[in-house]
Image (cartoon, rainbow, N blue to C red):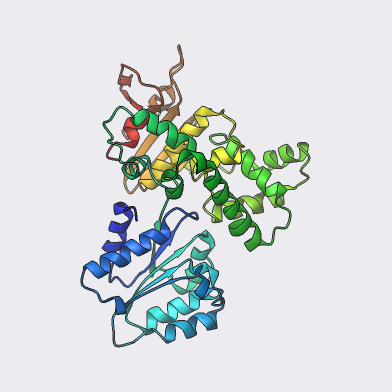
Amino acid sequence: MLQRPTYLKQLIQFKDNDNIKIITGVRRSGKSVLLMLYRDYLISQGISEQNIIYLNFEDFDLLSVQSQDQLSQLLSKRLNKNVRTYLLLDEIQMVDGWQRVVNAVRVSFNCDIVITGSNAQMLSGELATLLSGRYVEIPVYPFSFKEFLLAKNIDPNARQVDNAFSEYEQYGGFPSVVLASKEIKDTILSGIYDTIILNDVSMRSGIRDTDILSSLVAFLSDNVGQLVKPTKIANTLSSNGFKTSNHTIERYLTLLENAFLFYRTRQYNIRGKEYLKTSGKYFIVDPGLRRNAVSKHPGNYGGQLENIVFLELIRRGYTVDVGKLDSKEVDFVARKVDEILYVQVTYEIPNNTHETDNLLNIRDNYKKILITQRYYEFKEINGIPVINVVDWLLSED
């Protein structure tokens, strides 16, 4: 198993805490591996394997456990009120009514509980009501570029790092894809894509005709980094022969976000310090899935770069918005506790263009940076740091 020390550290920090730990993320991003790494850590700390219950609800032996009562019966046979137990439940959303059972276990037994799930809906509704303030979410993403290099045993200071970034940009960071030979990477990506679209979105939501859904994913993937509205999307798809409505598009967008396939950023008025009820940007969870969704055709290099920067910002714990300053756009306004970071992203700096002007017009003292995919001899423009994307991805936050 490949190590995920950043995520494992978070789990260890909450060990023996009353809060339920909920590991979330897109399918095949490494949630199950993280859960097993945590199990191995517990054993290394002297905890008996008899006091660790690991259940994966996608395993064949547990396919029959689909209801609240069946889950309750399964756990009641294994739990002991007199023994501290570590309960690890993988892909728990496969069981209807699991929220009540997990909450009852939390109340009635001496347990440290960790669960995983591939749908954001598990954090809303009944769970939010039952466990308000009693759970902590640990989001997991496909490999960062740092993790990508580690998995492939590439020294970050080696010459081949730029070639490695080209591969990362093309095929992304899903662990199974990173470790596969080039000949089968696209096949694995296609399988992941189909599983998310057909299983996690279509089947669970009762969508029989997936043509509109697939076309929506292709549209969003091809327009990463662009401001879009449901009305514009519906009109574009309709003009391409897919008759749909704003309501359908809005519903499908929510489903795609719930499956952690896309993330939506809102527009934030920097001067007025308020969110704008207008269009937003959608970013896909992995560069390789984007390439798969647009049938591998190249283009929109600036949007691809912006997508990679966005993903790294949320990996680092930032809440990310799209900035608007009068008529100008600031690509990202990233917040973390009391910190604000303004980020402008450009594939290359055009001649006679002041890419830093938007940042310079922001009248506060928070950090501002310009990220580019090209290397330049100069390191700043008008006091704004100019950073190559590879250097930034390998930096310490």
Residue 270, x across and y down, in percent: 45, 36
Residue drawn at x 66%, y 44% is: 216
Instruction: Return the residue nearer the eye: 347 or 363.
Output: 347
Q: Is residue 225 above or below residue 91?
A: above
Looking at the image, residue 209 sits to the left or right of residue 310; the answer is: right
Residue drawn at x 53%, y 34% is: 225
Residue found at the far top of this picture: 352
Residue 364, x across and y down, in percent: 34, 33
Residue 331, x across and y down, in percent: 46, 33
Q: Is residue 83 above or below residue 39?
A: below
Residue drawn at x 34%, y 27% is: 387
Q: Quadrant of residue 222?
A: top right
Looking at the image, residue 40 sits to the left or right of residue 24; the answer is: left
Viewer can see residue 309: yes
Looking at the image, residue 42 sits to the left or right of residue 30; the answer is: left
Instruction: Return the residue nearer the eye: 243 or 86.
Output: 86
Viewer can see residue 269: no
The quadrant of the picture occupied by the C terminus is top left
Residue 25, x across and y down, in percent: 46, 55
Instruction: Return the residue nearer the eye: 303 or 67.
Output: 67
Q: How many marks?
A: 0
Q: Quadrant of residue 155?
A: top left
Instruction: Return the residue nearer the eye: 167 or 11.
Output: 167
